Image (spheres, rainbow, N blue to C red):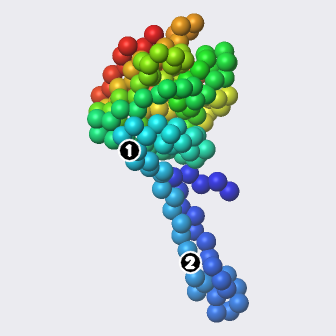
Amino acid sequence: LFLTAGETLDFLVGRGSNGTFNADSTGLAVTLTAPVFNLADGDVAGLIAAIICANASGGPTMINLAPNGTYTLTSVAYDEGSYYGGPVGLPWVLSQLTIKGNGATIQRSSAPGTPPFRILGLSWADCASCGHSLTLDGVTIKGGYVPSNSGGGLEIYGVVTALFKNKTITENY
């Protein structure tokens, strides 16, 4: 049995007065809520962990970035080689994810020696009917660099939905 956010599971706990599960048994209802992550400014490890949790959740997830925060990526978080198009600084989105940027920027470090990678990727991961989606709202994606491929800021692979609101994707190569 799998539930996703917003679904309710009703069940009876204990036996009723006549020794069976009936109308006077104690009832219990559990409603799942969508995971919400509120990240501190610059918490790249928290951002990576939140995306990993979103991918495992089976339902919609919300990540709220700090107002006008900056999340600077300094290393590759995931590299599937050429299968998805090379290295990324954040895990591939394989779920239903909304990132509310609140004016924040997610960027690749410009420091010498920072390896080339795209910032973010969205994929159907061999499951076209799973409803994978990414909403970026009020976030800037900056500085992704993939010299041998396209999509330095963001790569979208397969049958997925991407929605961009109040966002900027800039200085990606």
Tag count in the figure? Answer: 2
User: What type is the residue that disc 2 sits on?
Assistant: Gly
CA neighbours of label 1 inside 10 A, class few (<14), some (14 to 19), many (20+): some
Q: Which mark is residue 40?
A: 1
Task: Of the two numbered discs 2 and 1 on the same chain, state the one appearing first in sequence.
Answer: 2
User: What type is the residue that disc 1 sits on?
Assistant: Ala
Reply above or below: 163 against 49.
above
Query: Of 58 and 103, which appears nearest the observer?
Result: 103
Q: Residue at the right extreme?
A: 19
- Residue 132, image x, y percentages: 55, 34
- Dot 1: element: loop
Observer able to see residue 136: no
Observer able to see residue 145: yes
Q: Which mark is residue 27?
A: 2
Query: Of 160 and 36, which appears nearest the observer?
Result: 36
Left or right? Give the position of 94 relative to 166: right
Query: Of 152 and 16, which appears nearest the observer?
Result: 152
Reply above or below: 16 against 105.
below
- Residue 47, image x, y percentages: 47, 39
